[in-house]
Amino acid sequence: MNTNEREVFEEKLKDNTTLQQQVKDIETILFGVRKAIFKNKANHFHKTLINKDSEIKADKKVFNLNFKHMSIAASVVLLLGSVWFFNQKKSNSTLFDKYYIEDRGLETNMGETNNYTFDDAMVDYKHGKYDKAIEKWNLLQKNQPKNDTLNYFLGVAHLANKDADKAIKFLETTANNSESTFLNEANFYLGLSYLKLDKTDLAIETLQKSNSERSKAVIEALKE
């Protein structure tokens, strides 16, 4: 790690108990390797004093053993690098999990026949039946492709259904409608969709278009 990477790593280490434990495990392994090497050198020194004739054999043994220790140490270094790389790669996913909250949806009035299909889908959505909700909203959206409400809820339903790629298409439609009631929310969930897909720059750019406190919190977390 260079200086900047080390500073970022140490900052993450402060609040990440899992990463702290991984580092402790690696330190334990390194301590064991150093202890074994020291013990081996001490034994070699002792044997050399007792029997000069065994020096050549002992040297070969020490070389073989030290080569083994060096291999272990190299593996530990690779492991530490993997821990750092893994934590870097999973940071966006971790932030998504931390800040994602499913949209609660709208109140329904099943008595109004002209909104029955929409409301019926909303009930499915609230009960976690995302596929059914999406299927019903898709039927409505085909006749109203620019409807900001339908596109918004299709987007958040796909995101709740763990499909950020499909969510983006619908959320972008709503986010591009400056008159939409769901403008701030659409930009927030669109930003999270980009975050989920590791498109960090797009995530920040989109979240900045939302005035919600949650959007600001995610941006601050990304800049840390």
Image: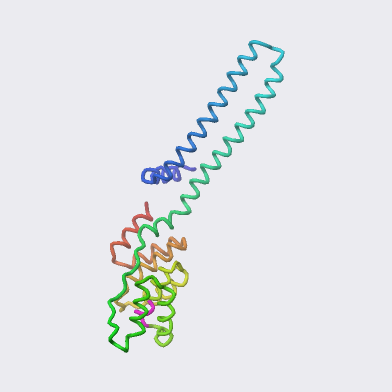
Q: Is residue 211 above or below residue 116?
A: above
Q: Quadrant of residue 79?
A: top right
- Left or right relative to 96: residue 74: right
Which residue is pictured at 52% across the width and 30% down the height? Answer: 32
**Image quadrant of residue 122?**
bottom left
x and y percentages locating residue 182 in the rendered image: 31, 74
According to the image, what is the colour scheme of the structure? rainbow
Answer left or right for 153 relative to 36: left
Q: Where is residue 163 shown, x and y percent of the image?
A: 46, 68
Q: Depth check: 176 or 66 in front?
A: 66
Q: Relative to 159, is 16 above or below?
A: above
Q: How many marks?
A: 0
Q: What residue is rendered at 34% in x and 72% in y?
A: 126
Displayed quadrant of residue 65: top right
Q: Is residue 95 above or below residue 32?
A: below
Q: Overall secondary structure of the magenta stretch? A: helix
Please, which residue is most extreme toward the top here? 50
Residue lying at 37% horizontally and 43% vertically, measured from the top left: 14
| Depth check, front residue: 101 or 128 | 128
Q: Quick check: is 149 in the magenta stretch?
A: yes
In this view of the protein, which residue sits in the foreground, 95 or 9?
95
Q: Position of residue 85 (x, y in %)?
A: 50, 49
The part of the chain drawn in magenta is: 147-151
User: Residue at 38% of width from left, 56% of height from top?
Assistant: 222
Left or right of residue 126, residue 34 in this image: right
**Residue 176: x percent and y percent?**
37, 76
